[in-house]
Image: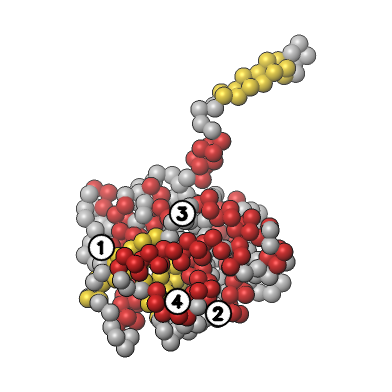
Amino acid sequence: GRTKYTPGSDGRIQSYSEQWDIDAGEALAQLIQPKKEAVDHWPMQLEGAPPPKPEVVFQKLPVVLLPGFGNDAKDYVEPLGQDQNVGLRSCLERRGLLTSVVPVKRSDWLRVFLGILLDDDARAGNGTARGAYGWYLDLTKTAIEESLASTGQPAILIGHSAGGWLGRAVLEREGLEWAQKHVQGLVTLGTPHRPPPEGQMDMTFGCLRNLNKAHPGAYFSDDMFYVSVAGDAVVGQKIEGNIPIVELIQSASPESTAWNSYQALGSYGNLTGDGLVPVDWAHLPGAQQLTIKGCLHSINIAGTTLPTNSSYLCESFVDKWLTEVFAVLNSEPHPVNVIK
């Protein structure tokens, strides 16, 4: 941008004007948009090498991806503006999964804060997902029903981060009969399934705590499978003088970001987890539980805008948790179409 001002005889500015090449919205987008750093998701990927052969392949099973808090559907298609081949949707499609993504926009998450603001119970810390997150549950329900209509099969839900407990909230709201018709299983990736301890600030304003009371653990496990996946990659470490909110975009270190996030979720910062969610918090009681060494939380290195090739959503880790899903499906009374 360009700034013009006119000084007066006393040295004070008499007039001032600004002219910007971009508007304020675009400037904000540039601030939070990750840098276009290149990273190989498999050997020689940036030089044009094709993806490696999958370790497990399914025969046309439908999957619905549930984005995490703050994520946009495109994060699972073109993560950080990278080639679509490295996105989770493509990773799953290469393995024979008919994949759709709940069409969440990043700006949609502002509706959560508005919902809390307008909800007396939520402001008092006693909210429910049906309130502040009702819009997300509606979008998810529609995506699941559309998946059934197009494939003729109930879907496997894959919930990333908060998308995991919000997937549970959809099942709770719609009930068992609907779930039996539309869903065959729920896989959660780095989902904080536990609320913070009593007396500590709850970023869900009671929504997660109330969900766990009404619909605890793998609640429909007699009728569908549950798999919870945690990453064991970063031990939190406190760095004196760090500012938690600043660490969202400019971290002193991954360990420092982890300390702040783990502490916000569970009171203790020196836990181990995926860099944002501690291992124990990511496991759902009653679910088949898998912990993956070295696995990070999301498409970027936590506390930075740099892409990573070492998260639940990346080619290098997808087979590790899909193999667990494969095993669970094959242990069901009526195995589905999977090959290995």
Above/below status of 117 relative to 57: above
Which residue corresponds to mark 3? 72
Type of amino acid under label 4? Trp
Nearer to us of marks 4 and 2 is 4
Which amino acid is tagged 1?
Arg
Query: Which residue does the numbered mark 2 point to in the structure image?
Result: 215
The three-letter code of the residue at mark 3 reads: Asp
Which numbered disc, 4 or 2, marks the residue that appears first in the sequence?
Answer: 4
Q: Quadrant of the N terminus?
A: top right
Q: CA distance from mark 4 to mark 1?
A: 29 Å
Q: Nearer the viewer, residue 289 or 58?
A: 58
Q: Amino acid at mark 2?
A: His
Question: Mark 1 or mark 2, which is nearer to you?
Answer: 2
Closer to the N terminus: mark 1 or mark 3? 3
Q: How far from the left and from the top, in percent, is residue 302?
A: 49, 57
Please name the residue shown 34% across and 76% down the image.
Answer: 325
Mark nearest the camera among 4 and 3 is 4
> Can you identify the residue that label 1 sits on?
94
Residue under numbered circle 4: 178
Q: Whole-percent x and y of residue 208?
A: 59, 71
**Dot 1 and dot 2 residues touching (CB under 8 Å):** no
